[in-house]
Amino acid sequence: MTRHFDLELKDLKSLLLKMGGYVEKSIEQASLLVIRREPWRFREVQASEIEINLLNKEVDHLCFCLLAKQAPVAKDLRFILAVVKINVDLERMGDQAVNIGYAGVDYVRRPMINITQEMSDMTERVRLMVRDSLDALVNRDVELSRLILERDEIVDQYKARLLDYLQDLMVHDRTLVESALDLIMIARNMERLADHATNIAEEVIFLATGEDVRHKGARLKEVNGG
Amino acid sequence: MELIAVKNLSAWFGEFQALKNISLVAERHEVVALIGPSGCGKSTFVRCLNRLHEEVPGGHLQGEVWLDGQNIYAPGVDPVNVRRGVGMVFQKPNPFPGMSIFENVSVGLRLAGISKRAVLAEKVEQALRQAVLWDEVKDVLKRPGTSLSGGQQQRLCIARALAVEPPVILMDEPTSALDPISTAKIEELIQELKERVTVVIVTHNMQQAARISDRTAFFLLGELVEYGKTDQVFTQPQDERTERYITGRFG
Amino acid sequence: MFERISLRRRLVNQLMLGLLFAGAILAAVPFFFISWYVLQKGLGALSVEFFTQTPVGPGQQGGGMANAIVGSSIMLTLASLLGIPWGMAAGIYLSEYGRGKTAQTLRFAVDLLTSVPSIVVGIFIYGVIVIHFGFSAYAGGAALAVIMIPIVARSTEEILKLTPQHIREAGLGLGLPRWRVILRIVLPGSRAALLTGVMLALARVAGETAPLLFTALGNQFFSHSLSEPTSSLPVQIYNFAKSGYPDMEAMAWGGALVLVLFVFIINLVTRALMGMRWN
């Protein structure tokens, strides 16, 4: 016998995936804006954000009602708690895509810096991480989630390299300072997007196994990288 | 138009007033849950919806109950006819003793004048399927209804109520005598029934009301304190008393 | 410490259990004694003739109690035809509709009737029927019926009250009128128990002597019609037993044995029915 509750959970999941779809689209548009220098894409980013915010509230409300009415336990409880957190992540991701959009629009008006390849590699990686994190959520795929955690490191390295390069550039060519600052802002936000995708992956691991993998090795990272 | 419309209903047991001026409407294809502490009048309320209240010694009432556009308390309305159009499921599973599973489900049909064996068989199967019992009993239809397990008996009673295809089914704490698994089955069943009928269910179990209903009515001391969407009643009740009750801070 | 208290308690328990068991044994002793006595005395009188022939005069060999057996059967049938439906109707009323003062009074009257001595019932029927129409099987049957009615009524009422209220409500809820709920659901549901009650009432009146003395009187031969004096086992036993002739006394023992066996069989059947009820 299928539970009626399962249908509601399925609804919740599909809402979340719809939201994820908008986030993905938003990131894609924002990065194309930067890479191809196409400022009109900002409107797409903003349109997605409106949808994301609406869905954010809807998912929140549904979780709220399900928690109140179904008193979920075990797997159901983990799922809803995970959804509540992922919902926050996705909403923040929407905001970050908008941030990238704003910076991108500024950057497009300024002299170009020739790091297109690096930038597009990084954004592509981030976009894939976001997509994979949502896939992992759908399939409760622990393996994929663990891979995402590893891939976060690589994105961090990209960001570090870009920042080093741009700092250097600003010292040597003062005409490019503003452009470089825009790109730093963009890289920062990209890196944050990857962090949120990582959060989602962590939630998926929690959801599937009950294991809390957050903040493991965080101190080590601080010592080495900070 | 709403399927059930109760207007200014008051009910008494002799001198004792069990319901005080209740008004409430329910739409088609909804599950309406009635919650509240023991003795709050919720059971009396459902029993007013099929004129069963008046069968209790000293039971009498005032007000109107409109069912499908007809006031069932209008002068000249035969309570027996009213009851044929409203199914009822009770707290304890109560298949009729001495009757087979088949007979239990077909009683109402025979009463409605259906006597052709083939038609009866078809309708009985349909009702048992709707009550998600068919697969378990299809080979033992001749066995006494009382030979089934408690949960099965309750589903048999639901099938018995469904057989005559009433637009409304009343349930008076239908799972309070059942184990958790049987309870879960009945709860799922109720949500499936919604596609065909309106279910008005009395429950002691607040979580059950929350899980399965679309609307929730909170009764207290014979008064309808709050009635609204279940989502809302269980997340943001409007009345302080409802809040206290559903959060377990009552009394 | 604990040990000693528990030992004392165990002894007291044993003692009480022993007393109760002795009580139970003593209660059952008369039954075995009576059975043994009747069997011993009566078995010798039983023969084919006993069941096929009418009594012969004192001092003569042979003869039987066929007329008494037939007479008893007839009057029990008459009593059942009258008393069972009447008693059940009363019981149904008291159980299903019996509320308020009228019903209270009726219930009390039925209770009183149960405890009216059976000889008084006999005199009553004598005054009402026999004076006008003479001794007959009808009058005998009527007297037995009057004794049966309150027994059947009260057992019916008690049995129907055992049917849970929610079963009736389920019937009402389905749109059955009250009388159909009773007829189609409540009565069939307690079929076996009702039959049990009826059987016990029958067993109770089967041995009644006093009410038949003034109503059916007795008959040395087969009766030709129901409006003639009719023989019955208890009356025949009574007459033979006080006759003073050893032959007749022996016949009386035989009759007593048949009567005991009859009641015994009814009880066995009842038990079987009770068993059915739980299945």
Image: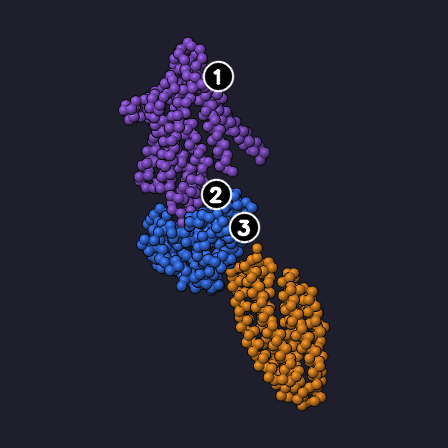
For label 1, the residue is C47
| Kind of residue sitting beneath label 2 | Met
Q: Position of residue B96 (x, y in %)?
A: 46, 44
Residue reaching furthest to the left: C132
Q: Earlier in the sequence, mark 2 or mark 3?
A: 2
As drawn, the chain in purple is C
Q: Position of residue B200 (x, y in %)?
A: 44, 56
For label 3, the residue is B134
Tell me, yes or no, if residue C210 can be seen here.
Answer: no
Characterize the local packing of mark 2: few (<14), some (14-19) or many (20 or more) Cα atoms within 10 angstroms. many
Q: Color used for chain B? A: blue
Task: Tell me the quarter of the picture where residue A28 sits.
Answer: bottom right
Give the residue drawn at x 64%, y 74%.
Answer: A193
Label 2: state its secondary structure.
loop
Closer-to-camera residue (A85/B8): B8
* Quarter of the figure with the C terminus of chain A: bottom right
Mark 2, chain letter?
B
Give the residue drawn at x 38%, y 38%.
Answer: C92
Label 3: state its secondary structure.
helix
Residue B178 is labelled as none
- The answer to whether residue A225 is above or below residue C75 is below
Q: Position of residue A76 (x, y in %)?
A: 58, 60
| Kind of residue sitting beneath label 1 | Ser
Closer-to-camera residue (C134/B95): C134
For label 2, the residue is B99
Give the residue drawn at x 57%, y 55%.
Answer: A1
Q: Color used for chain A? A: orange
Q: Position of residue A43 (x, y in %)?
A: 57, 81
Give the residue drawn at x 60%, y 82%.
Answer: A41
